[in-house]
Amino acid sequence: MAVFGTKKYDESPEAKAHRVTLIDELTFELVPLKSLDAAVQALPAGAEVSVTCSPTKGIEETQRLTAELQSQGFVPIPHVSARMVRDHTHTVELAEWCRELGLRQIFIVGGDAEVPGEYPGAVEFLADFLTTNHGIDTIGVTAYPDGHAFLSHKTLRWALHEKQRLLAEAGVNGYCSTQMCFDPDAIAKWLRVEREMGLTLPVHLGISGVVDKAKLLTMGARLGIGDSLKYLRKNVGAVVKMMTTISYDPNDLLLPLSSDLLDLGVTGMHVFTFNQVEATNTWRESVLSS
């Protein structure tokens, strides 16, 4: 199932152990779509679940799903889309909701709402949220090794480092989770540069789960993976492999990166399942049992 071919990679025992730990403790991202019920049923008991914020269904649906998942014994991490938050009063209400539900972690994104509320982006919302009585221990923020469809690399870097500064000043733990990217060299290069520029946040590697190839290839620039799709198109071997297999194998990205994951401070893995949880968890269990 390899997208990047069948090349063998030398992997030290330490690197392998770290890679396997990341796979064992991965976070499953779920999307509030019709396929959600089946996806939830396929989750392993007690799984950490990232709950996205749909621009059509709103933050309220994310809140509902978060409470439902928590009641079923999972550990939900709700996404809060900054551009969908109306104003400071709404921010205070969200903070109260977090505290009442006993949430320890949230994930803040800029969001896709065409007409924003009071906050044009994640930095502005984060700054305001941190002034509330939220009760949150850890806040995740976004990072873009593959660039963004509408934001420059300079803007992305400023935003990431500003979020790091705000979290540090507030005394709140943080991490950055990378948008999906298929090019292991691009990820490693991006993270080395960011570390040199002063990024100290732990990194959670965003990676596609075991997903049907047609679904994966239709994601495109909407998810900020345009350069990775260009990478696939230019890499003949990758395209041939993609078109002769049914689904994508996450190890095709993890194995080339294995020696870098520990050294560059990758402490978690965020899996974009597109609600195809059963296939991803089957892959996860096969890695853990091998």
Image (cartoon, rainbow, N blue to C red):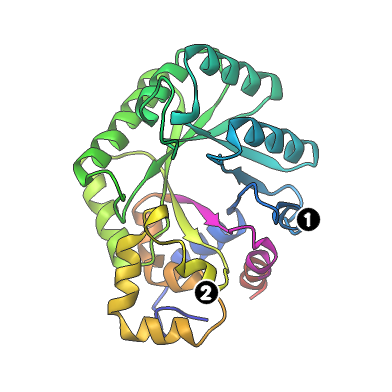
Residue annotated with mark 2: 213
The disc at residue 277 is: none
Among the 4 quarters of the image, the one containing residue 161: top left
Under mark 2, the amino acid is Lys
Q: Which residues are magenta?
A: 267-282
Residue 34 at x, y = what percent? Answer: 70, 53
The residue to which callout 1 is attached is 41
Q: Is residue 12 left or right of residue 213?
A: left
Rendered position, 217 above or below 104: below
Front residue of 38/86: it is 86
Residue at disc 2, secondary structure: helix
Eyeballing the image, is 216 above or below 192? below
Mark in the foreground, 2 or 1: 2
Q: Is residue 22 at least partly visible in the picture?
A: yes
Between the C-alphas of marks 2 and 1, the distance is 23 Å
Q: Earlier in the sequence, mark 2 or mark 1?
A: 1
Asked if residue 280 lies in the magenta stretch, the reply is: yes
Number of labels in the image equals 2
Q: Residue at x 27, y 41 (%)?
A: 156
Q: Amino acid at mark 1?
A: Gln
